[in-house]
Image (cartoon, helix red, strand yellow):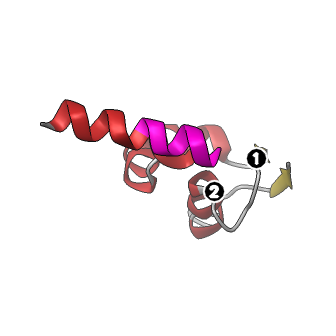
Amino acid sequence: MARQATNNTLHKAKSSKSDEFYTLLEDIERELVFYKECFRGKTVYCNCDNPKESNFFKYFFKNFRLNETRSIILCS
């Protein structure tokens, strides 16, 4: 059952041209906590179609001061 649900999700994402189906905010938060030191004083380049929809942008915007990131550059 879970496999079918995943397959349906992938097909919907493909038809809507959405690539955020595999970058859940929770997954980004769980992984990037280990890289906090890597972002200190750095500029983060975030290539995304729509910053309002991008979970990577949401993470970096929310954690800008916590990560001590110097700046965020967005482009599509």
Secondary structure mostly seen in magenta is helix
Q: Nearer the viewer, mark 2 or mark 1?
A: 2
Name the amino acid type tagged 1: Cys
- Residue 50 picture location, percent across and down: 74, 59
Q: Dot 2, crowdedness within 10 Å: few (<14), some or many (≥20)? A: some
Q: Which image quarter is the N terminus in?
A: top left
User: On the image, which quarter does residue 51 sit in?
Assistant: bottom right
- Residue 12 picture location, percent across and down: 48, 45
> Which segment is the magenta one?
10-17
Using the image, determine if residue 74 lies above or below residue 12: below
Give the residue at mark 2. 54
User: On the image, which quarter does residue 42 sit in?
Assistant: top right
Q: Nearer the viewer, residue 35 or 8?
A: 8
Name the amino acid type tagged 2: Ser
Apparent side of residue 8 relative to residue 23 in the rendered image (left or right): left
Q: Is residue 13 among what the camera can see?
A: yes
- Residue 63 picture location, percent across and down: 57, 64
Q: Nearer the viewer, residue 61 or 65?
A: 61
Apparent side of residue 5 relative to residue 35 in the rendered image (left or right): left
Q: Dot 1, crowdedness within 10 Å: few (<14), some or many (≥20)? A: some
Extreme residue toward the left, this view: 1
Give the residue at mark 1. 46
Using the image, determine if residue 34 lies above or below residue 25: above
Labels 2 and 1 touching (C-beta < 8 A): yes
